[in-house]
């Protein structure tokens, strides 16, 4: 007979445990080859339009595109040619150290953007375009284009590849490397562009990075 202090054992259930709900990651559907190709075309088309807008008002962006803008303004060579040549050394590093699919898509994106920036000025012209509006609109267009590239595991090469490699091999933060390069580009721009245009370029860069910060998040987008 049980004492007043003792308690009967808790009843056990023989029913099987309910299965856990499926994880969204387990149901992830990768982009098809056609979807990747369409995304690269759409992204580079948007970025090429942003480049055309920036070129009209002698504005700048960050990263490798910023260096290409500087050389374009200083030498007179087209942005597309300069951008393509600047990226060539980084392909060797990327091919040895990074995922081959990423490298191939990045090479395709760079080639497409180089070609589109040559063609776009022949198809689009702007009679009136305020520099402040150009900075915001160009930043938005390029931000959306970069976002599409990143979501399809591609980039526009250059400094991004170097930053990723140094982060993996030396432990340096890629964001800090990118920021340092962008600061150097802004300082160099003071010798080639009016201060007001440099300030507007910084505003455009902020707009571009806001697009990426708000939308390029793993907790909101899981397709790859």
Image: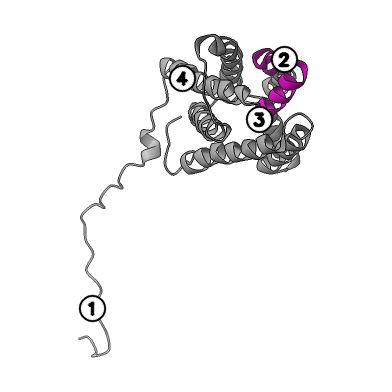
The first of marks 1 and 4 along the sequence is 1
Category of crowding for the residue at label 3, using alpha-carbon neighbours closer than 10 angstroms: few (below 14), some (14–19), many (at least 20)? many
Residue with the mark numbered 2: 85
Residue with the mark numbered 3: 60
Q: Is residue 11 above or below residue 63?
A: below
The first of marks 3 and 4 along the sequence is 4
Q: Give the image location of residue 135, x and y in percent.
A: 57, 33
* Image quarter of residue 161: top right
CB atoms at circles 3 and 1 under 8 Å apart?
no
Helix, strand or loop at label 3? It is: loop
Q: Give the image location of residue 38, x and y in percent.
A: 44, 17
Category of crowding for the residue at label 4, using alpha-carbon neighbours closer than 10 angstroms: few (below 14), some (14–19), many (at least 20)? some
Q: At x 55% / y 33%, what residue is drawn?
A: 139
Q: CA distance from mark 3 to mark 4?
A: 22 Å
Q: Does the magenta segment cover residue 16?
A: no
Left or right, residue 152 beside residue 27: right
Helix, strand or loop at label 2? It is: helix
The first of marks 2 and 1 along the sequence is 1
Left or right, residue 204 beside residue 170: left
Q: Which region of the structure is painted magenta?
A: 62-84
The first of marks 2 and 4 along the sequence is 4
């Amino acid at each position: 007979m049980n004492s007043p202090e003792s308690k009967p054992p808790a009843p056990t259930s023989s029913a099987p445990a309910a299965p856990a709900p499926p994880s969204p990651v387990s149901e992830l559907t990768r982009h098809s080859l056609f979807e990747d190709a369409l995304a690269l075309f759409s992204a580079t088309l948007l970025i090429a339009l942003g480049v055309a807008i920036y070129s009209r008002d002698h504005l700048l962006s960050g990263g490798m595109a910023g260096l290409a803008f500087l050389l374009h303004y200083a030498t007179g060579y087209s942005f597309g040619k300069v951008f393509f040549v600047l990226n060539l050394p980084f392909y060797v590093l990327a091919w040895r150290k990074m995922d081959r699919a990423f490298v191939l898509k990045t090479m395709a994106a760079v080639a497409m953007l180089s070609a589109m920036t040559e063609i776009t000025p022949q198809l689009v012209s702007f009679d009136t375009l305020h520099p402040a509006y150009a900075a915001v609109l160009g930043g938005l267009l390029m931000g959306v284009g970069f976002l599409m590239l990143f979501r399809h595991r591609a980039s526009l090469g250059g400094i991004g590849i170097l930053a990723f490699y140094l982060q993996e091999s030396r432990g340096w933060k890629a964001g800090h490397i990118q920021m340092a390069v962008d600061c150097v580009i802004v300082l160099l721009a003071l010798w080639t562009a009016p201060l007001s245009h440099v300030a507007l370029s910084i505003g455009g860069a902020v707009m571009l990075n806001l697009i990426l910060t708000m939308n390029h998040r793993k907790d909101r987008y899981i397709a790859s």
